[in-house]
Every structure is written in structure tokens, then in C-alpha cells.
Image (spheres, grey):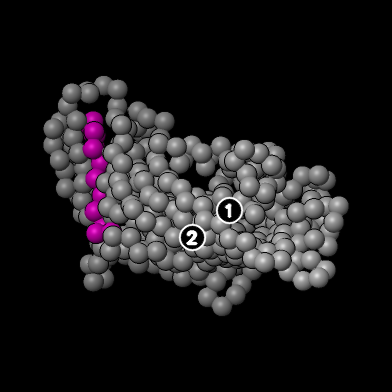
Amino acid sequence: MIRWNLIALLAAVVILDTSAASDAIAQKAAVEGVARAEEGRAPVQFALVRLVRADSSRLPSDHPPQGITNASGRYRFDGVAPGRYRVQLLRIGFRPVLSDAVQVAADETVQLELRVASQPVLLPEVIVTADVCVTAKELMKHPQIQTLWQQARDGASVRTELMARFRYNVLQHEESYELKADGPTAPGMIDQPYVSHPRWAVRNAARNRTRRLSRGYYGPSKDSLDGFYVPNELDVLHEDFLKAHCFVPAVARGVGEVGLRFRPLRTRRNFLDIRGTIWLDSATYLARRIELEYVDGEESRGTFRADFGDVAVDGGTLRMPVGGAFTMRPSRKNPAKRTEGKVTVTYSGFEEVPRR
């Protein structure tokens, strides 16, 4: 049995609390509104919104207040200290928006509607350099890779915000069988239900990502079944991933899709790493699938395909991991031994958890 270690992300209505300044605690305000498309005035669902100072100075917080619009396009920032602010909106397929400055007074709720124009993302021409793999420091030299990387990361940021706000149920159903000389074994099945809760979901995701990057993608432990850890798009699109991996300069292309190909920065024996492609929809730049290969040095230890689909959420849809298929060789001593199988993932019980 493999470790299908998804970070599933779902939401119903998303209203974000924000971090407040240490001063003026007793007199706080709010900024709220709705984001609508210029054409047809349809709500812009699940867009990333940030509250920034009108004069571009930093807010008194380690992280700027940010959240996402809900399925009706609404957003809200609570606990805002008096001052002048702008609201920034980012959404794949739309032009970035930075609102006009608004003055926020104590105990006031400011209404601010955002009008968003659609804009297809145009990829710059690719610059192919032989025998080069693009690291984080070299992204600016490869505008096509940088554009894809940033567009996909904007989508991942929305999903991370959802993860920090909602409790939901996940059911992972796995079927697998072992291939032997005399034929495959009878399929084994297992259901793994668990609850994702904001109290620990983001923290656990960061911890697991750090562990995989430092120790490899295999290793029996108390939270592993048979050791093969499956990264999702949030792992591959995280800045930490590029500390140990790089992107192949030439973008892969398919029907209605583009692919970011990645590999380890260095080859390590007795260290299970991954290389492969994350495929993005060429119109929305949302994840379609991840095709990866597990490698120990140059030796292949298995493959995994993680599929993504649109999941209905409170009148909107979100792109979520929904399943996959795998072929693994768990034993180095017996390379002929293989395990094959598939996984399906379903979600239910979305419940917003107010921030403390």
C-alpha cells in the first residue's frame, strides 16, 4: 500500500479574518465587497484578495492580510486599523486588479466593489539552453517558465487559504495488487477516511513537505503505510521545491495543456527523489495531473499519475486531487516484484472554522 499523501482543499463560503495591528485594538474597521467580471458581471469566484497600504508601506504584520472570494465573489477583511488601503485581486484568466485607495475610519465598514477584466495569459517565447535546468535564481532568464510558475502558484495560494479556513472530510479508496511470476494477486482494498482541520492542516503540510525534501520520498515511519509519498501540486509549486529541484527549460505541450517538467538538482544514491511533469490547463493554468517517476540515483523505482478534477463547492468549483494510478517496485533486492493500483478521493462536510 502506498502513502497517498494528498493535501485536499475545499471551501464553501470564504470570509477571511485578518491580522490586526498591535495598536488601536479597541477601534477596528472592516473592508468588504464583491468582485465581478466586467463582461456579464458574473461573480469572480475563489480569487486571491490582499489588503495593502495605499502608500505601499508594509502593514504591521509578518504577512499581509489575504483571503479569497467566495462562490458569490464576496470578500471581507475584519479587524482593520484606521488608515488608507487598497485591495489587490489575483485570479488566473483575469487581469490583476489594484483598487483605488479608500480611507477607512474607526468602527467603519467600507464597501469596495472590484471590476475584473478577463485576460488570457500569453506565454513568452521559450529560450532553450542546452544542458541547463532552471533553478529559482534563474527563473527571470526564462520568462516562459517564470510565467507558468507564477500563474500556477497563484492558484496554489488560493488553495492554501482554503486549507487554513475549512474543516472537511476526505475518503481515500485504494485498490492494489502484486504482480508475480504466476500472475497477479487478488486485489486488496483499503479505505482511509480522515478529517482536514485548519488547526493542523497547513502546519502538517509544511512539516511533511520539509521531511520529504530532506529525507526523500520513501521511508517507513509511524505516519507511512508502505513508504512511497505522493507529492501534490502544492508541493511541486512551493518555493522550497526549487531548493532541491529545477525545471527543464522547454515547456511540454499537449492538447489544451502545457507542462512544467522538473527533476532533482543532483543525483543521490539511496535517496528516493522524484522527477516528472506537472500538467496545467493552457486556458486556466489549473492543475490537470502530475506524472512523476520515483528515482534512486538513476534507478527507476516506480511511477505515479495524480489526477485533478473540478469539485462542486457551494455554487462554485475548485480544482482538487481526485485520484490516480501507480506502478511501484518497493524492493531493490527483487526488481521483478511490482505493485500496481489506483486511488480515488472524495470530499464532504465542508465547514468554515473561524480563526481564533
Q: Can you identify the residue that label 2 sits on?
A: 345
Q: Are marks 1 and 2 in contact (CB under 8 Å)?
A: yes
Label whose residue precedes the other's in the sequence (1 or 2): 1
- How packed is label 2: few (under 14 Cα within 10 Å), some, or many (20 or more)? many
Q: Could you tell whether 286 is left or right of 60 in the image?
A: right
Observer-nearest of 283 and 184: 184
Amino acid type at image mark 2: Val
Q: Which residue is farthest bottom?
A: 255
Quadrant of residue 341 within the rendered picture? bottom right
Q: Nearer the viewer, residue 12 or 69?
A: 12
Image location (x, y in percent) of residue 218: 70, 46
In the rendered view, does 128 fall on the left or right side of 53?
A: right
User: Would you say the magenta stretch is mainly helix, strand or loop?
Assistant: strand
| Residue 83 sits inside the magenta stretch | yes
Residue farthest along the left direction in this orientation: 108
Name which quarter of the figure residue 277 lies in. Answer: bottom right
Q: Which residues are magenta?
A: 71-85
Q: Amino acid at mark 1?
A: Trp
Looking at this view, is 134 or 127 the one in front?
Answer: 134
Label 1 vs label 2: CA separation? 10 Å
| Point 72% across, 63% down: residue | 178
Secondary-structure class at tag 1: loop
On the image, the x and y values in percent for residue 354 come to 28, 39
Q: Position of residue 183 (x, y in %)?
A: 77, 71
Q: Label 1: which residue?
A: 4
Residue in view at x 26 percent, y 49 percent: 75
Q: Tell me the quarter of the image containing the C terminus.
A: top left
